[in-house]
Image: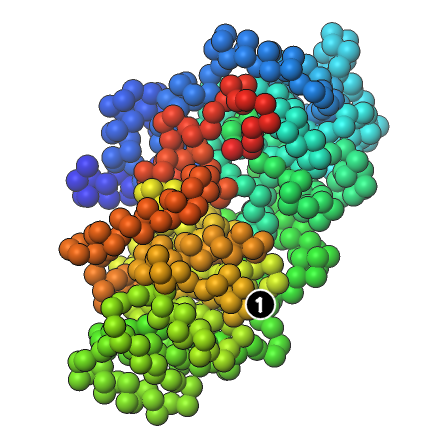
Amino acid sequence: MPPILNAAAAAALRVVRRAPGLHRAVHAAALRLERTAWGERFIRGVLDEGAGETIGYAAWVDRYDTLREADRRGIAAHIARFERTPLISVVMPAYAVAPDLLEAAIGSVRAQLYPHWELCIADDASPGEAVWTTLQRLAASDARIKAVRRPSNGNICAATNSALALATGEFVALMDHDDLLSPRALYEVAALIQDHPDADLIYSDEDKIDAAGQRYEPHFKTGWNPELLLAQNMVSHLGVYRRALIEAAGGLREGFEGSQDYDLALRVAEATTPARIHHIPWPLYHWRQSGGPETFSQAQMDRCAVAAQRAVAEHLARTGQPVSSVARMDDTPGWVTVRRAIPEPLPMVSVIVPTRDRADLLAACAEGVLKSGYGPLELLIVDNGSVEPETLALFARLSGESRVRVLSAPGPFNFSALNNRAAVEARGDILLLLNNDISMPAPGWLEALVAQAVRTNVGAVGARLLYPDGRVQHAGVALGLGGVAGHVGHFAPGETAGYFGHLKSARNVSAVTAACLALRKTVFDQVGGLDSENLAVAFNDIDLCLKIRAAGYDIIFEPACELIHHESASRGADTEGPAHDRFRAEIAHMRARWGKTLDHDPYYGPIFSLRHSDYQLARPPRRAPPWTLPPHADRSR
C-alpha cells in the first residue's frame, strides 16, 4: 500500500482507538474481513498494528487452533499412554458475575479433553442468590466441581485462597470466573508433565475474547524470562503451579488485589529453579473483555498498577537485587520499569572501537564516550589501517587525552581479531564493544549497561539502537531470523513499545549486537572471545552470545541505554561484491556449529515466522501438536 495510505490509516486508527464503541465496531468488522486472503492482505497493508494486535489471527485460529475429530482422537490416544495422570485443581474465585458467563467458564472446564481435574470455586459473598444458585446446580451435576460460599466479601485474594483450600490436586491452575479454557488446555499441561515431572510452574500463551466469541490480541510469550517478568506479568494466564509451592508460599497475599497472581508468580519463582519452569507456546486461555461486569483489574487499574510495582519491588528486595528505581511504565500503567543500581565503586570500563578512517563518525563516537560522565574508563581505538589525513589528525588530537589509546592493527578487516587484540590490552573489568558509527544523544547510557553487566548471572548486555531517522535498528536478536539470526522489531517506529512492550522492556534474549555490547572481561576470556578464524565480519557477536549462554550466563537487552547507530556507514553491506562469498561461508559455519539451536529461540517462539522480524504469525506454526510427537519429545517447543 502507498505510504500516504498507511499514514492516513494509522492516524484514523489512533482516533478510533480512543472511542471504545467505534473501536469495537471497527474491530469486529476487521475480524470478519481478515478471514479472507484478500482481506488479510488489505488489513496488513493499511493498518498500523498495535502491540499484540496480530493481523490474520482469526484465520490462523480457524486453520491451526480448531480441533478436528482426528485431533480429538489423537489426544485421547496420547492420554491413554500417559505414565502419570496428575490431578489438576482449577481454582476460581467468583463474585457478582452474570450466571451465563459463569456457566460458560465452568463449561469450558467440563469440556476439557484431559479428564483428571477438579474445579474449586469460592463465591465471595456475591449479592443476591444468582451466583450461588448456579454453583450449587452445576456442582450437583458433576462430582468434580466443589463450591464454597464465603460468609463475607474478602476480595479476590481471600476468595482465591478459600477456593485453594478445597484443592487436592498436585497442580493448581488459576482461572477467573468469566474466562474460558481451550479444550486442550489441561491436556497440554499434563502432556508437558509427562516429560518434566519435576515442573513447579507452567504457563501458556493467551488471547482475548469478546462478547461475540471472537478471539483477538494473542499474547505469544517468551520462554522463561526473569528480566521481562520484572516489567510485566508474563505468566498470568494460564498459570499452573505445584500446589505444595503455593501452600508453602502462604497462598495469595491480601493487599495485592489486581496483581495477586503477579505477586504469586514472583514468589513461586523464587522457591524453584529455571529448569523447573516451563512455557507452553500455545494460546490455552481466553481472557474475556466484554459482555459482563468489569474485572477487578479493569475497574481499578490504578490500584493494580501500584500492587504490581510493589510486588516487583519486594521481589527484588527478597532476592537481593539492588535497584535505583522501580516505577510504573510510561503509558502502560500495569507494567513496571526497573532501573538497576550501579555498583560502588564504579568498575573500570574499557571501550573498544575498531575503525578505519571516517573521522566524522569516529569523532562523534569518541566524544560521546569521553563526555559520558562515567568516571573510570579508557577508550581503545583500534586503527585498521586508516590513511585519510583527517583521521590521522583526529588520532593525534585524541591521543593527547589520558583516557585514550590508539592501537595499530593494519591488514584486512577482521572485526573479531580487532576486538580480541584490544581485549588483551584492556585494563578494565568491563569491556564495551562499540562500533565507530554510534552516537550518544543522552547521558546515563553507560551506567545502564554497567549496572547489568556486573551482575553475576549476566554474561552480556546490549543496547536499544535507533537509526538516525528514529526507527528501531536493534532491540535484541532472535535466532533463526533470515536463516541464522536477525534483529527483532527492525524498522519499527522508535516511539512504540512494540509487541507487548518488548522493544522498550529489559528482557532476556538469545543474543545482542556487538555494535554496542558490554560484558565482564572474565566472561570474554572464559569463552575465548570472538571467533576471528571463522567469523571475521558477520555473526561473530551471535556466536559470542551463544557461547556465553552455553556457559550458563544470561544475555540482557537493556533499553535504558538508547543510542543512535549509523549502521555499516563506514564499511558497507555484507552482501555486496567480494564480501558475498565470505558472508555465505560465515552462514555455513554458524549452521554447522550451532545447528538446531538456531531454529529454537526460546525468546522468539515457534508461533512467529522466521521470515519476518515483526512478530508475524508462522503459517504453519513451527510447533507440532504434542499428540503427534514421539515419546519424550520436548513439548515446550
Extreme front residue here?
533
Left or right for 10, reference 149? left
Extreme right residue here?
151
Left or right for 622, reference 578? right
Left or right for 156, reference 612? right
Check the picture and name the quadrant holding the N terminus. top left
Residue 207 screen position, x and y as percent? 50, 30
Label 1 sits on what residue type?
Val
Q: Residue sitting at 47 percent across and 71 percent down?
A: 431
Regarding residue 61, the answer to whether it shows in the image is yes
Dividing the picture into quarters, in which one does residue 13 lie?
top left
Numbered circles on residues, count: 1
Residue 585 screen position, x and y as percent? 29, 50
Above or below residue 560? Residue 158 is above
The residue carrying mark 1 is: 454
Dividing the picture into quarters, in which one does residue 421 lie?
bottom left
Q: Secondary structure at mark 1?
A: loop
Regarding residue 121, the answer to whether it shows in the image is no
Dividing the picture into quarters, in which one does residue 92 lie?
top right
Residue 633 screen position, x and y as percent? 56, 28
Q: Residue sitting at 21 percent across and 52 percent down?
A: 580
Q: Residue sitting at 71 percent across and 35 percent down?
A: 198
Foreground: 335 or 320? 320
The color scheme shown is rainbow
